[in-house]
């Protein structure tokens, strides 16, 4: 699709890949479907092109996405710290996918900053940290990093994806499908063109939908019920809703990373709600997930109050306060943004 990326960028990326002997591909902390889809698609494509590469993620990914790492070759920094340090020490090309700031990779950040390798960023989030990378391919208008990667590969392949490996096509579809919430948001004409071309290659969308959206544990489903029945608080005066989950509650339902995926969207299904938040207690901090509808920018909201960033309608961050104070703090932040919230509700 014309305008998604410059041919010059694709040429520069191809030249960097051709020169590299060992490539490290990585994504952000708490990898979601777009993150994992992007790194596995990139790995498949590069191996298809005859390149040696390894995938690194900062911490474990959700169980429902484990099928994307069938051979269990993804290096998880919290589990394979020495192996991660080793591949970074030997890499001559680092490809960062689906994050805009190096702080999004936590303990892996110094390994990237201290590396002498050529560094490439491919991402769809606003305000990328350009100074940390040698090549930046960024576009906020695409649905997902997987979609941006699709157009990059398509450009390098002369305008067609007919020769890409089947597992690369599958991973690209998973990344796009999850970041659009199964085509519910952030979808443009190019997204449908991408899905058409991938389906035409033989991607089985029904099977992927079942694996991604139907591969959760019983504990996850019971945690969702508990969250909606007992934990969701609706603030009609602000057009907002939020859920707070403590460490004890997560343990009670045998929480595994990724089990709360999608919970933050639930309050937005209520008439009149334009902003929602999910707060989950972690070791040393509160993880913040924010979503919005209409004209309210949770990117700005997160930057201002939650030490984070993201898209205009989907953002995240961290709080460093006791979990018992989170609800009061969130409501105070909403009160300070009353004018913006009121405008969003009027749309």
Image (cartoon, helix red, strand yellow):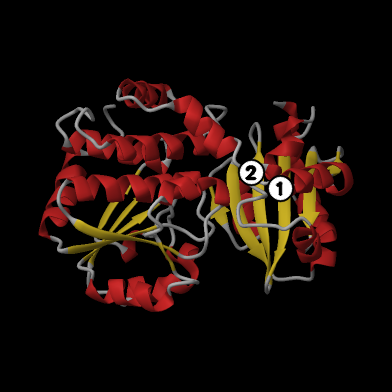
Classify 197 as above or below 227.
above
Q: Secondary structure at mark 1?
A: helix
Q: Work out whether residue 277 can be spotted.
A: no
Q: x, y (%) of residue 36? A: 44, 49
The residue singled out by tag 1 in the image is 220
Q: Are marks 2 and 1 in contact (CB under 8 Å)?
A: yes
Q: Quadrant of residue 248?
A: bottom right
Q: Is residue 26 left or right of residue 284?
A: left
Q: Residue furthest front?
A: 71
The image quadrant of residue 303 is bottom right
Give the Cα separation between the discs numbered 2 and 1. Answer: 6 Å
Q: Which residue is pictured at 67% across the width and 56% down the height?
A: 288
Pick the front one: 190 or 53 = 53
Q: Position of residue 241 (x, y in %)?
A: 79, 43
Residue 277, above or below 26: above
- Neighbour tally class for label 2: few under 14, some 14-19, many 20 plus, Cα within 10 Å: some
Rendered residue at 77%/48% (across/down) = 223
314 relative position to 187: left or right: right
Image mark for residue 147: none
Q: Quadrant of residue 215?
A: top right
Q: Position of residue 76 (x, y in %)?
A: 45, 66
Secondary structure, mark 2, is loop
Q: Position of residue 53 (x, y in %)?
A: 25, 59
Image vertical order of residue 51 relative to residue 172, above or below: below
Q: Which residue is mark 2?
A: 216
């Amino acid at each position: 699709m014309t305008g998604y990326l410059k041919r010059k960028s694709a040429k520069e990326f191809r030249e960097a890949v051709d020169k590299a002997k060992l490539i490290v591909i990585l994504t952000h902390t708490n990898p979601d479907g777009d993150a994992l889809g992007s790194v596995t698609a990139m790995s498949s494509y590069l191996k298809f092109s005859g390149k040696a590469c390894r995938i690194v993620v900062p911490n474990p990914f959700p169980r429902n996405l484990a099928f994307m790492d069938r051979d269990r070759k993804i290096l998880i920094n919290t589990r394979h710290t020495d192996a991660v340090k080793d591949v970074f020490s030997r890499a001559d090309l680092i490809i960062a996918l689906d994050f805009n700031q190096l702080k999004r990779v936590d303990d892996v950040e110094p390994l990237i900053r201290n590396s002498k390798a050529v560094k490439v960023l491919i991402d769809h989030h606003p305000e990328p940290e350009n100074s940390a990378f040698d090549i930046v391919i960024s576009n906020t208008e695409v649905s997902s990093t997987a979609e941006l990667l699709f157009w990059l590969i398509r450009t390098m392949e002369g305008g067609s994806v007919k020769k890409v490996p089947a597992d690369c096509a599958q991973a690209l579809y998973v990344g796009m499908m999850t970041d659009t919430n199964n085509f519910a948001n952030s979808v443009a004409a190019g997204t449908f063109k991408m899905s058409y071309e991938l389906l035409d290659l033989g991607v089985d969308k029904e099977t992927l939908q079942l694996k991604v959206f139907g591969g959760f544990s019983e504990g996850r489903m019971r945690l969702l019920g508990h969250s909606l029945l007992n934990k969701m608080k609706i603030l009609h005066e602000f057009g907002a809703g939020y859920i707070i989950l403590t460490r004890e509650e997560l343990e009670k339902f045998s929480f595994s990373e990724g089990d709360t995926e999608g919970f933050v969207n639930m309050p937005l299904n209520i008439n009149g709600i334009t902003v929602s938040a999910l707060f989950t207690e972690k070791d040393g901090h509160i993880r913040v997930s924010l979503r919005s509808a209409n004209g309210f920018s949770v990117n700005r909201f997160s930057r201002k109050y939650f030490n984070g960033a993201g898209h205009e309608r989907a953002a995240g961050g961290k709080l460093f306060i006791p979990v018992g104070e989170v609800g009061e703090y969130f409501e105070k932040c909403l009160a300070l943004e009353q004018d913006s919230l009121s405008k969003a509700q009027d749309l």
